[in-house]
Every structure is written in C-alpha cells, then in structure tokens.
Amino acid sequence: MIDIFQVMEQAIRSTQPSVMATIIHVEGSAYLKEGTSMLFFEDGKKCGSMSPGCIEEDLSYRVKEVFKDGKSQTIVYDSTVEDDLMWGQEIGCGGVIYILLVMVDDSLKENLKRVRDQLKSGKKVLHVIKFSSNFTVEFSGYRTEIGELIGDKRIESLENSNWPTKSGLINLVYYHTYIPRKRLIIFGAGPDIEPLVELAVKIGFSVIVCDWRESLCNRNHFPQAHDFIIGFPNEVLQKLTFTHEDFVVLMTHNLKRDKEIVSYLLKKQLRYVGILGSKNRINLLFGQTSKPPWVSAPVGLPIGGQGATEIAISILAEMILVMRGEKVGEGAIYESGGHIPSSRKEQSNGKE
C-alpha cells in the first residue's frame, strides 16, 4: 500500500499539476481512516488509494473541477443509505467518509517539504485545517513536535492544549498527526533478507541494512532500503544511535558476529529485537543470560514458513503485533478468542 511518505514525495517532485485527496472525517466504518491521502495527476495517473476501488473513479471526475478553478472541495460519500446503488449497499462499509480535495500549488509543496524533513528527523508533525460551515478550507498549517509552525500561522489559535491523540474533525477543525516511519535495522545482507526489506518498506518501515560485506550491502541488492552501514558489528554499532522505538532483526548467519551484536543490544531498551536461528543456536547466543521481553528468539510467528519470503512474512507479522501493542511471546489474539501458544519459540525459522 502507498503510504503518506510516498504521496508527499510524489506531490513535491511532480512537475505536472496534481490534486491531493485526504480523508478528513469518518463516521461508522470505512476501509481507510482519517489522514489517508492520495494524489490525482492531470494526466489521469494516481498515487495511493482511498478505498478498495469503490470511490476512486468518482473522485477522478471530481478533481477535474479542482484542476479547473483551483478551489478546494469537500466530498461526502455516504454508504449508510441503503437505496443508494452507488454508495449504499453496493459498498457495504456502512460509513460516511469526508474527503478534502486541494490543489497542490507551490506553497503546499514547500510546506510538504518541510513536513517531510521533520518526519525524516524523527519528529511528529500535527496537521491542522480550519473549515467554514460549508466545508471549504479557511486556512491550513502544521505544527512540529518542537512547536515550529509551518504554513498559516493562524492555526496557533486553534490548537488544543494537549497534542490531539485522535485524527478527524472537532468543531470544524481537522487534526491529524503524522508519525515518523519506524526504523527497522537489519544486521546481515544475505539474499534471504531481500523479501524482508521489500515487505518492510511496503508496510511503512524505514529500513537500514548493516553488514561488513560491501559487495552485498548496497542498493543493487536492496533497492528499497533507505540506508546502508558498512562495517563489522563494533564499527556499525558505533555509527548507530538507537531509540526505544527501533526494531532490529539479526540475520547474519554468523554466530560470532551475532554474539557481539546481542551483547550490545541487551544493554539497550528497544521496541523489538528478532533473532533468526534454531533453539540450539539461540541457547549458544544467550547462554545463562535471560532474554528481555522485547527479544524474540527464534524470531517470527509460527506459520510454518519455508523459504525467505514466508519467513519474512512471519517476522513482519510479529513486528506488526508489537506495533499494535502486543508483547513479544504472548501471541496474537484471534477473532475466535484463542492465542498462539508461547511454545511457538520452539520453532527455528532459520539455520544453525
């Protein structure tokens, strides 16, 4: 799925006119929530999505008016009206979606550049839009985590005393917080990490690949990765500054290197560390040292994964659980109310 970072980059770099569509409010259920954005280009191309395909075609017609007069519009799609063949029972979502269409002009591009740079530096950015009673935009701007204002300074008078925790409309004011991409730091650059890098980027991670083999650790092998750090573990670890929100996966297939990395990481408090390997290999890595609750070893959910792609899926599934608030080792809660048993750690998902 295209994320907001890709939409921003496309909006900033495009040389042709474009319109940005953003979900600003949802009542009931919907495929995607407030803050979701996509781009419509003048030549008919699109970047991103608003639905499983239900409303994009109609939006393509609506944006033509915005291209024509440059004025923003707010479109409402009501799928709760059962006798509406277009948006009622045919969709089946049972919700009401408010979508704002705005022309991407030079001023918006400059604002988006500054927002992007703040996110890249690891800072949250709050988007604030003031609407009139007929849902036309009165003014719009952004506030960074450190209080810097981007765009229209009038947003300062509209902000809540506390940073809004929920996106959407409050008294004709839209709030949405852009969160920096979470980092996934992978130690190892073998061919088995290729699907992990590719899939992690697709679900919104900023991926850093670390390895001592320059011939493997490069953009030719991992074109989607955001950064590379070349060096042996002691060199790489000196170049990295870890945060409590970082995700780390060890896939070096080198026991000596892994011991160096594990010894260092155990002194940190990270969001998630996953270590590829069998139970016997994990015992050699830790010895008598107990594993912290944020370490998954062997890594991944027990889906019976075989091959690099299925193992990558099992790792990312576990990482998503952690992002959603589950603790490593406790397992996912299924709709039926069951749990993945903690004995999943008997699974190897890797080599000795």
Image (spheres, rainbow, N blue to C red):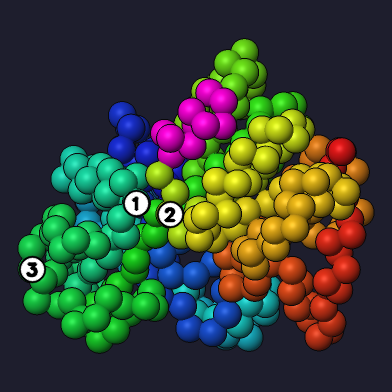
Q: Nearer the viewer, residue 350 or 258?
A: 258
Task: Report whether residue 87 is seen.
Answer: no
Q: Give the range drawn in magenta.
A: 231-240
Foreground pick, 310 / 241: 241
Give the percent coordinates (x, y) of residue 171. 25, 86
Q: In the rendered structure, which amino acid carries the disc numbered 2?
A: Thr
User: Which quadrant of the view contains residue 144?
Assistant: bottom left
Magenta stretch mostly in which secondary structure?
helix
Q: Residue 122: which numbered mark, if any?
A: 1
Using the numbered discs, state the Cα–Cα distance from disc 1 to disc 2 in whole angstroms: 10 Å
Residue 319: which quarter of the image? bottom right
Question: Mark 3 falls on what kind of element?
Answer: helix
Label at residue 156: none
Disc nearer the start of the sequence (3/1): 1
| Residue sitting at x 63%, y 46% | 262
Asked if the residue under mark 2 is in contact with the one under mark 1, i.e. CB atoms within 8 Å, the reply is: yes
Give the residue pinned by disc 2.
243
The residue furthest top is 215
Q: In this view, does 96 lie to the left or right of 103?
A: right
* Viewer-side label of 3, 2: 2
**Residue 196 in sight from this viewpoint:** yes
SS under mark 1: loop
Q: Mark 3 points at which residue?
A: 154
Viewer-side residue, 112 vs 56? 112
Q: In this view, does 248 lie above or below 168?
A: above
- Judge depth for marks 1 and 2 and give the one in front: 2
Q: Which residue: 90% across, 43% down? A: 306
Q: How crowded is mark 1: few (under 14 residues within 10 Å), some or many (20 or more)?
A: some
Task: Decide: is 328 above or below 223.
Answer: below
Amino acid type, label 1: Gly
